[in-house]
Amino acid sequence: MTKKHSTRQRAVDKIVAVMRNGIDLRLTLGQPGGPSWDLTNGIHVPTETARLVIVHYRVERCDDGLFSDAASQTYRHRSPWPKVT
């Protein structure tokens, strides 16, 4: 595992952990710099990281996209979190 990969994976794990507490990840279109990924607590998420978060097995889409063939714009943590024994 490369250093860049492990740093990115730590960022994904951290965001998924935050989402576990009820924070959603949202894609906002039409921003001056292009699409923007942000957590509902106001923290910006880089696009590369967001793309990895939305395919995480504990994250699910929770609405339809703006258009019928568009991807979802809101993602949530799947519940319940498995208990560690």
Image (cartoon, rainbow, N blue to C red):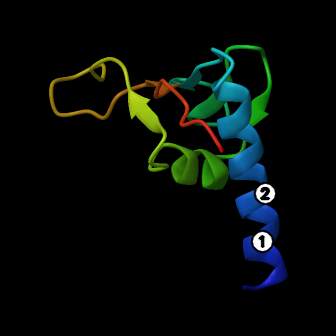
Residue 52 or residue 13, whichever sits in front: 13
* Image position, residue 76 (x, y; %): 50, 24
Q: Position of residue 80 (x, y in %)?
A: 49, 25
Label 1: few (<14), some or many (≥20) within 10 Å? few
Q: Position of residue 33 (x, y in %)?
A: 67, 36
Query: Secondary structure under badge 1?
Result: helix
Q: Secondary structure at mark 2?
A: helix
Residue hosting label 1: 6
Viewer-nearest residue: 8 or 38: 8
Q: Residue furthest left?
A: 68
Residue at mark 2? 10
Left or right placement of residue 41 versus residue 27 in this view: right
Q: CA distance from mark 1 to mark 2?
A: 6 Å
Image: 83 above or below 41? below
**In screen coordinates, is 42 left or right of 20?**
right
Tell me, yes or no, whether the two marked residues, 1 and 2, touch with CB atoms within 8 Å: yes
Apparent side of residue 52 relative to residue 43 in the rendered image (left or right): left
Q: Quadrant of the C terminus?
A: top right
Position of residue 55 measured from the top left corner of the image (x, y, whole percent): 44, 50
Q: Nearer the viewer, residue 32 or 3?
A: 3
- Label 1 is placed on what type of residue? Ser
Q: Residue at x 60, y 44 (%)?
A: 50
Question: Vertical placement of 31 versus 52: above or below?
Answer: above
Q: Amino acid at mark 2?
A: Arg
Residue 20 found in image quarter: top right
In the figure, is residue 63 to the left or right of 53? left
In percent of the image, x 47 and y 27: which residue is there? 75
